[in-house]
Image: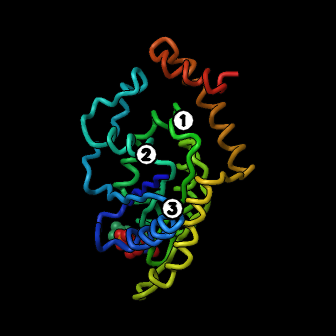
């Protein structure tokens, strides 16, 4: 069982969000998961220019690190999206990365995985950013098992005080991967999303027969 955490903070080892995420991963590891955390700032991620080349064959014109990160996401059973709050939103690094996932969203290539959201902030926006990260997980076909969002108020020790809660979240994620996890509300959202993206997959049928056949095989064209 593999869990990949993706941290949008540029502060690498100093990142509050990375520290909180590491507690989530420790909880998951205790429950038997093999875990990994990556910092987006260590990778070359070119912003999407809406050239629409990926619609034609699923391949971006930019030769950078995004395909490699996506391959790691595809290999993982669980995905943790982690970001600090920047101006009441995710960081720019995280958003530039998410924009590059549009084709993965359209083709729903991560369906069947579980995930969770991890957020830190000084004061504002944790709830909104948790909701957004969970929404993007759902967009990708991933069911979110929970989340943790912390406002530090600049107090030392706030992150460490939440270690037990973060570990519980990691255990829950590993448990969902091992035993399954049902959430009718999210399952309905995922089904609606597939209905919506089906139009795109159908429109691209001639250009991308393999992608279309995959949807047929999964019963998503019925
Ligand atoms: C550019 C920037 C924007 C920020 N915007 C907000 C904000 O809107 N609200 C807030 O409460 N904290 C804000 N913060 C504070 C961070 O969210 C907070 O320090 C967070 O824990 C940093 O996480 P990190 O150490 O993982 O990078 C901002 C920090 C930076 C550098």
Rendered residue at 60%/64% (across/down): 172
Rendered residue at 45%/80% (across/down): 159
Quadrant hosting residue 132: bottom right
The kind of secondary structure element at disc 1 is loop
Extreme residue toward the bottom, this view:
156
The kind of secondary structure element at disc 3 is loop
Q: CA gap, disc 2 to disc 1?
A: 12 Å
Compared across the picture, whether 48 is left or right of 63 comes to right
Quadrant hosting residue 65: top left
Quadrant hosting residue 139: top right
Rendered residue at 56%/76% (across/down): 165
83 or 116, which lies in front? 116
Point out the frontmost of discs 3 and 1: 3
Image position of 206 with respect to 130: above or below:
above
Extreme residue toward the right, this view:
184
Of label 3 and label 1, which has the lower sequence position?
3
Asked if disc 3 and disc 1 are in contact, CB closer than 8 Å, the reply is: no
Q: Which residue is mark 1?
A: 108
Q: Which residue is mark 3?
A: 32
Q: Position of residue 17 (x, y in %)?
A: 41, 69
Q: Which residue is mark 2?
A: 73
Q: Residues within 10 Å of mark 3 (few under 14, many from 20)?
A: some
Compared across the picture, whether 44 is left or right of 164 comes to left
Compared across the picture, whether 54 is left or right of 12 comes to right
């Amino acid at each position: 069982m593999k869990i990949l955490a993706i941290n949008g903070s540029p502060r690498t080892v100093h990142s509050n969000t990375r520290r909180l995420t590491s507690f989530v991963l420790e909880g998951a590891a205790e429950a038997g998961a093999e875990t990994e955390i990556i910092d987006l700032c260590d990778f070359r991620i070119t912003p999407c220019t809406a050239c629409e080349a990926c619609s034609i064959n699923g391949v971006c014109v930019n030769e950078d690190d995004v395909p490699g990160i996506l391959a790691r996401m595809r290999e993982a059973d669980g995905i943790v999206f982690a970001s600090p709050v920047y101006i009441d939103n995710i960081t720019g690094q995280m958003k530039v990365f998410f924009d590059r996932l549009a084709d993965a969203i359209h083709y729903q290539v991560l369906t069947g995985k579980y995930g969770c959201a991890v957020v830190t902030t000084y004061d504002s926006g944790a709830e909104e950013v948790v909701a957004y990260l969970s929404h993007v997980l759902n967009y990708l076909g991933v069911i979110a098992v929970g989340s943790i969002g912390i406002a530090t108020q600049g107090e030392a020790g706030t992150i460490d005080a939440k270690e037990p809660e973060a570990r519980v979240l990691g255990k829950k994620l590993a448990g969902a991967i091992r035993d399954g996890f049902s959430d009718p509300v999210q399952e309905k959202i995922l089904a609606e999303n597939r209905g919506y993206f089906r139009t795109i997959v159908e429109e691209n049928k001639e250009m991308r027969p393999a992608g279309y056949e995959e949807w047929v095989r999964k019963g998503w064209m019925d």
